[in-house]
Image (tube, rainbow, N blue to C red):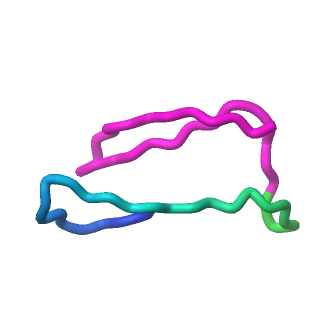
């Protein structure tokens, strides 16, 4: 989870970076994947990205 709490402004910006570096504790699967932004438990944005 990136942020959990009450937002007091109309707009909130944030930056989250995710490393896809090969490690022995995780496996990356090639192909299409999705990421969603949930606000109050409701999906607001869903985007896809490709690992290849």
Our reading of the magenta stretch's main secondary structure is: strand
The answer to which of 51 and 29 lies nearer the viewer is: 51
Q: Indicate the quadrant containing the N terminus: top left, top right, bottom left or bottom right.
A: bottom left
- Say above or below: 36 vs 27: above
Q: Position of residue 39 (x, y in %)?
A: 27, 49
**Total numbered circles:** 0
Q: Indicate the quadrant containing the C terminus: top left, top right, bottom left or bottom right.
A: top right
Q: What residue do we see at 38% from left, 37% from top?
A: 45
Q: What residue do we see at 70% from left, 35% from top?
A: 50
- Say above or below: 35 vs 22: above
Q: What residue do we see at 75% from left, 39% from top?
A: 51
Q: Position of residue 13 (x, y in %)?
A: 32, 58
**Rendering quarter of residue 6:** bottom left
Q: Position of residue 49 (x, y in %)?
A: 62, 36
- Say above or below: 40 vs 2: above
Q: Position of residue 7 (x, y in %)?
A: 18, 63
Residue 35 covered by magenta stretch? yes
**Rendering quarter of residue 21:** bottom right
**Rendering quarter of residue 23:** bottom right
- Region of the chain picked out in magenta, as a range: 27-52
Q: Is residue 13 left or right of residue 51?
A: left
């Amino acid at each position: 989870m990136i942020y959990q709490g009450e937002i007091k402004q109309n707009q909130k910006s944030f930056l989250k970076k995710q490393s896809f570096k090969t490690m022995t504790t995780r496996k990356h699967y090639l192909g299409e994947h999705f990421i969603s932004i949930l606000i109050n438990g409701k999906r607001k944005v869903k985007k896809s990205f490709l690992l290849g």
